[in-house]
């Protein structure tokens, strides 16, 4: 009997050692009391409005480069797919780019038909941009967030769960497409007049985290670029997740963002269009038609196109002269991948499974338009007060997600302890990131 208790005690002791080597408690230290917050604020305080460079009339050129692969690759977007290869091509994928230049600085705005801009692409792009005379501080990246695009771009267990088996050639393929799109866009640069509008479409978006208890970001935002030769480009963002096509759909497609781009380009006044995911966190399509996903997509896109077509009759475009971009490296709390409300994986284990990449906020100024690129699924619930603050500064604010880094979801802090996908599984660096990112964004607006 003594032997039994000794064995049982040893097993229990080993179990406890193993448990505490794998898990630790959630750190709920207020973010403003942390070292990472102080470091990030110091970096932000070192930036002033001098990043905005006035020059000649802003010129712009645009292009698209095909991102449809020549071989079958895994689909990215749903872990349920288990890394399945796509079966067919419903509609082609693209990298779309606008390059701006005011003779004093040059900036590229790039969006790709991908789930996110992968970290590995960002790393490779750092070096590749030098080949075209740019640095990473001259590019704002985003993705359409299609859940039926190519995968294979993320190493590690977690990357393969969402994007299938890793293939470094996919990273090279995406990176080269971005570089090619920049070079092509440069070829047709001409002075442009720039306009901005936003259209409220609350019926097209719903809160997928807490339903009617939560907020939505209902605005379709539009930047219009009108070259002196009469050619016109339209850049749009919207917050609803492109999840009209479910995990059982196995064909390549851009989803509703692609249909929207195609319909905008079919308008008489528009020659080129591109789309970037807005503050898609906690936001889903408001249209319900699960039996026919393409009917659902058409019902989403129809009102958007109608609003844009109507808005084109009233939009004012003007020459602009101010252009600038900076990137704010982010300090973050240690990783908080939670297995319960107060228990999380130890940071070292998180980094083993998820990787360890730097992250930053990208800030681009285009005349009176302020574009802010986030390294996450940024929640649409957080946008309204930031938009109002920007309006007080006579700025038009656009927040996009997936800027080339990825830290999971940033959601409203009041929901942090909900046992939901966004708040428990994918909120990797909380708590209090909703307030933290909102404060940083507010300070960025004040700089402008």
Image (spheres, rainbow, N blue to C red):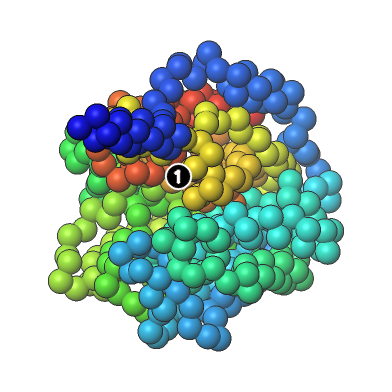
Q: Residues within 10 Å of mark 1 (few under 14, many from 20)?
A: many
Estimate the x, y position of residue 326 in percent, counting from the top left: 70, 39
Q: Is residue 67 visible?
A: yes
**Residue drawn at (45%, 44%) of the image:** 408
Instruction: Locate the C terminus and report the quarter of the image it occupies.
Output: top right
Q: Is residue 316 visible?
A: no
Secondary structure state at the residue bearing disc 1: loop
Please state if 401 lies on the left or on the right of 84 as rendered. Answer: right
- The residue lying furthest to the top in this view is 33
Estimate the x, y position of residue 13 in percent, counting from the top left: 36, 30
In the rendered image, which quarter is residue 85 located in? bottom left
**Residue drawn at (75%, 34%) of the image:** 51
| Mark 1, residue position | 408
Please state if 351 lies on the left or on the right of 277 as rendered. Answer: right
Estimate the x, y position of residue 298 in percent, counting from the top left: 28, 69
Q: Nearer the viewer, residue 231 or 155?
A: 155
**Residue drawn at (78%, 51%) of the image:** 135
Estimate the x, y position of residue 117 in percent, counting from the top left: 56, 57
In the rendered image, which quarter is residue 426 located in? top left
Q: Nearer the viewer, residue 380 or 16?
A: 16
Please state if 397 lies on the left or on the right of 247 as rendered. Answer: right
Residue 394 to residue 378: above or below: above
**Residue drawn at (81%, 63%) of the image:** 132
Instruction: Locate the N terminus and report the quarter of the image it occupies.
Output: top left
In the rendered image, which quarter is residue 20 located in? top left
Count of residue discs: 1
């Amino acid at each position: 009997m003594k032997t039994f208790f000794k064995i049982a005690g040893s097993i229990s002791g080993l179990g406890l050692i193993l448990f505490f080597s794998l898990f630790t408690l959630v750190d709920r230290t207020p973010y403003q009391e942390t070292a990472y917050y102080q470091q990030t604020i110091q970096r932000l305080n070192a930036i002033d409005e001098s990043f905005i460079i006035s020059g000649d009339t802003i010129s712009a050129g645009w292009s698209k480069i095909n991102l449809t692969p020549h071989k079958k690759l895994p689909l990215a977007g749903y872990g349920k797919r288990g890394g399945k290869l796509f079966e067919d091509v419903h509609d082609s994928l693209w990298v779309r780019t606008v390059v701006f230049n005011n003779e004093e600085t040059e900036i590229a705005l790039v969006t790709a038909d991908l789930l996110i801009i992968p970290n590995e692409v960002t790393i490779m792009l750092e070096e590749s941009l030098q080949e075209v005379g740019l640095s990473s501080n001259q590019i704002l990246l985003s993705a359409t967030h299609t859940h039926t695009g190519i995968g294979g771009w993320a190493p590690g267990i977690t990357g393969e769960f969402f994007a299938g088996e890793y293939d470094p050639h996919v990273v090279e393929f995406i990176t080269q497409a971005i570089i090619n799109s920049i070079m092509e866009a440069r070829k047709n640069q001409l002075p442009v007049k720039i306009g901005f509008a936003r259209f409220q479409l609350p019926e097209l978006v719903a809160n997928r985290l807490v339903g009617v208890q939560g907020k939505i970001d209902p605005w379709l935002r539009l930047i219009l670029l009108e070259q002196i030769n009469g050619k016109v480009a339209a850049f749009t963002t919207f917050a609803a997740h492109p999840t009209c096509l479910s995990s059982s759909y196995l064909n390549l497609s851009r989803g509703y963002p692609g249909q929207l781009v195609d319909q905008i380009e079919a308008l008489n006044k528009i020659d080129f269009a591109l789309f970037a995911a807005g503050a898609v966190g906690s936001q889903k399509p408001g249209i319900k038609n699960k039996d026919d996903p393409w009917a659902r997509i058409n019902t989403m896109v129809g009102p958007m196109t109608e609003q844009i077509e109507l808005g084109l009759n009233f939009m004012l475009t003007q020459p602009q002269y101010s252009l600038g971009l900076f990137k704010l490296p982010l300090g973050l709390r240690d990783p908080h991948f939670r297995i319960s409300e107060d228990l999380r994986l130890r940071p070292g284990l998180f980094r083993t499974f998820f990787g360890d990449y730097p992250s930053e906020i990208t800030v681009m100024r285009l005349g009176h338009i302020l574009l802010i690129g986030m390294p996450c699924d940024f929640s649409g619930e957080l946008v309204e007060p930031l938009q109002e603050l920007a309006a007080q500064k006579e700025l038009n604010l656009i927040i996009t997600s997936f800027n080339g880094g990825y830290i999971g979801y940033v959601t409203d802090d009041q929901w942090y302890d909900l046992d939901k996908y966004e708040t428990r599984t994918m909120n990797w660096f909380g708590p209090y990131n909703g307030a933290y990112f909102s404060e940083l964004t507010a300070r960025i607006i004040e700089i402008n």
